[in-house]
Amino acid sequence: MNPTIDLCWEVERLEAIGKNRARVRSVAVGGGGINVARHIARFGGRAIAVHTAGGEVGLRLNRLLDEEGVDHVAVDIAEDTREALVLFETGSRRSYHVVPSGPQLNEGEGERCLEVLERFLGGCPFVVASGSLPGGLRDDYYAAVARRVREAGARLILDTSGPALPAALAEGVFLFRCNRTEAESLVGRPVNSFDDARALNEHLLTTGAAEIAVTTLGALGALCSTSQGHTELYVPPLPGEPLSDAGAGDSMVAALATRLAAGDDPVGACALGVASAAAAMLTPSTESFDVDVARALLPQVRTVSRA
């Protein structure tokens, strides 16, 4: 609903005075749902990205998606699609991800997005709603998505934050993935451990908010919870220096969706998700992670089952 074009620039070191000479490292499409669709294709799956596109930036977004070979359907909007900037300091090996809020959508544009989504629901077993909503849409927008997905007999994987989250969870989803910050917004206290994540996941399951709850805990790993129990998944040792966590969540969701659509159990799908998020940490921006690295890390994802 709120895609971007991600520009990644490299500088030796950011200086407060004078010009910072930069090298363009990459220009890529971005935003939660688009990133998930791109990564699913790289895993060998098939996804259609339904997204907004507005102005000259929107035209460029469509062109980049076409060049990358991503199946997508654009919904025209009046305001310009946003651009985001990643600054990577080669000296310190630090990344700075600067993201504007993006365009304001009107009610008609939001409804057109729902109409386009409904056209594809009949042949899609899974729908991923990923990323924050742009301004102008109702807080219950993802709840409306959840209803349409359920009525079509499909399963919704939700990965969002902000005011739209409580209403969507009240509607109920198949799988909900949240990071530590989003988890803390739901429970109103820090979520630093597997025990903290377990309390949240149990609440999501018992209230019917989600059939599967996955809470990620940064460098610690993730907790995957179903009616069968809880499984702690630990991040494997990285084969290089972590550079950025931008896009790690999208990488995990793509792996989850790909493996669930292929018939894997949730824990197995989540293990590939943890490996993919770890692989994404090795890139300095929202560039696509190395799928071969993710697959090589998969056997090193340690799992511990809890009742």
Image (cartoon, rainbow, N blue to C red):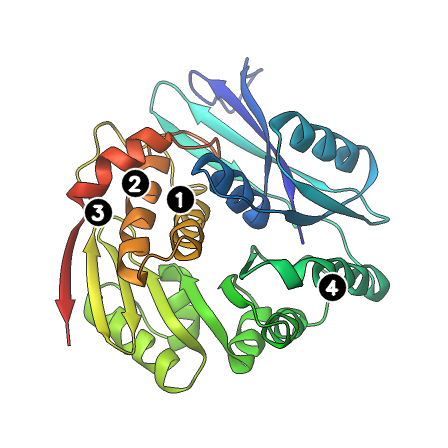
Amino acid type of the residue tagged 4 in the rendering: Leu
Q: Are marks 1 and 3 in contact (CB under 8 Å)?
A: no
CA gap, disc 1 and disc 4:
27 Å
CA gap, disc 4 and disc 2:
33 Å
Q: Secondary structure at mark 3?
A: loop
Amino acid type of the residue tagged 2 in the rendering: Ala
Depicted 109 relative to depicted 170: above or below: above
Residue 172 can be seen in this image:
yes
Q: Is residue 222 left or right of residue 62?
A: left
Q: Is residue 269 left or right of residue 38?
A: left
| Disc on res. 248 | 1
Nearer the observer, disc 1 or disc 4? 4
Nearer the observer, disc 4 or disc 2? 4
Q: Earlier in the sequence, mark 3 or mark 2?
A: 3
Residue to which mark 2 is pinned? 278
| Disc on res. 114 | 4
